[in-house]
Image (spheres, rainbow, N blue to C red):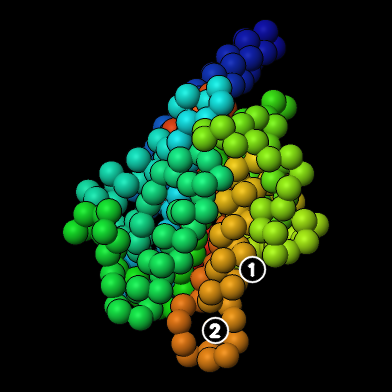
């Protein structure tokens, strides 16, 4: 009977259709579970290792205990209407992690929160220069204000990373790697000591138009930092750090390091350390929360190490 065969065919096709849909949904369920598992594992990896994929893993393959590169990190305290400076919290968080034995920070020599004033910046830069000379000349390995768990310098490179908050409205929620510093102080508000220079040279020995640049390959560092979905779009490059205390610190640091160390390396390539300087502007915690900024800061160390 044709009707019987027609109904049977419809029933068979309907059952096949239902089975196909069921198999698809089952596969979809397993795929989602696998995807969730992968993402969860990757997030745990971000938090524990400070890198995101194989290229980062290779960059961090050498144990921090055997690293040839050491770091000094600074942040700023409050200023103006910024009562809680994100960079101070980052430095506090990284200090706690290092003192608790976080291997990712075992090559960090010194962490310091700087009072947001031109005078304090000058003093801090001179303290860092003096510390580096002590390391070079007397083998001093621990800063006086650091606990006995502080790291020991090794190798020929030390990197100074200065963090400052980007508080200007309309700025992207990014870690901005600053490439240049300018010999100009033009404070829109007084610093925390009440000092407010207007279009004045930071160092009167040099022309106010003089620009100094980091010798680190910031483009390569940016590319390396953005090699995972967790960090993509969160790293930017900037050619102007402003004219406030952030630029004041960047210029002062670059200038003194070049005066004290670059010249000596030219005279004797085997003498002293090669010292690099980088300033990084970070956003508010409303834009990028503290935990993620700490992760980016730790990853920055690994990416700089790979770029040198």
| Residue at point 57%, 66% (across, down) | 256
**Of the numbered discs in the image, which one, if any, rests on residue 264?**
2
Discs 1/2, front: 2
- Residue 2 vertical position relative to residue 71 in the rendered view, above or below: above
The residue at which mark 1 appears reads as 215
**Of the numbered discs in the image, which one, if any, rests on residue 60?**
none
> Can residue 26 be seen by looking at this rendering?
no
Out of 215 and 236, give the one closest to the viewer: 215
Pointer 2 local density, CA inside 10 Å: few below 14, some 14–19, many at least 20: some
Please state, as top left, top right, bottom left or bottom right, where the N terminus lies in the image. Answer: top right
Query: Which residue is situated farthest in the top direction here?
Result: 3
Please state, as top left, top right, bottom left or bottom right, where the C terminus lies in the image. Answer: bottom right
Residue 71: percent from the left, percent from the top?
A: 42, 62
Residue 280: percent from the left, percent from the top?
A: 58, 48
Out of 22 and 97, give the one closest to the viewer: 97
Residue 108: percent from the left, percent from the top?
A: 36, 59
């Amino acid at each position: 009977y044709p009707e019987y065969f027609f109904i049977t065919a419809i029933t068979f096709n309907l059952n096949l259709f239902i089975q196909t849909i069921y198999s698809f949904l089952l596969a979809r369920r397993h795929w989602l579970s696998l995807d969730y598992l992968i993402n969860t594992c990757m997030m745990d990896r971000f938090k524990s290792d400070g890198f995101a994929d194989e290229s980062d893993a290779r960059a961090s393959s050498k144990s921090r205990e055997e690293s040839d590169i050491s770091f000094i990190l600074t942040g700023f305290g409050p200023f103006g209407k910024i009562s809680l400076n994100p960079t101070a919290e980052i430095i506090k968080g990284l200090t706690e992690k290092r003192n608790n034995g976080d291997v990712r920070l075992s090559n960090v020599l010194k962490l310091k929160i700087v009072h947001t004033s031109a005078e304090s910046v000058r003093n801090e830069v001179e303290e860092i220069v003096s510390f580096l000379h002590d390391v070079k000349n007397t083998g001093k390995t621990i800063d006086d204000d650091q606990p006995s768990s502080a790291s020991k310098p090794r190798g020929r490179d030390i990197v100074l990373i200065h963090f400052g908050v980007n508080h200007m409205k309309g700025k992207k929620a990014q870690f901005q790697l600053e490439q240049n510093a300018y010999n100009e102080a033009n404070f829109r508000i007084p610093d925390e000591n009440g000092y407010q220079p207007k279009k004045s040279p930071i160092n009167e020995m040099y022309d106010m138009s003089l620009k100094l640049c980091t010798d680190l390959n910031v483009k390569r560092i940016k590319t390396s930092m953005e090699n995972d979905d967790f960090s993509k779009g969160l790293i930017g490059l900037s050619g102007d750090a402003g004219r406030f205390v952030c630029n004041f610190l960047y210029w002062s640091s670059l200038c003194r390091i070049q005066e004290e160390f670059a010249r000596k390396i030219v005279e004797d390539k085997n003498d002293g350390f090669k010292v690099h300087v980088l300033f990084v502007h970070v956003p508010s915690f409303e834009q990028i929360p503290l935990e993620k900024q700490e992760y980016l800061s730790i990853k920055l160390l690994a990416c700089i190490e790979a770029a040198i």
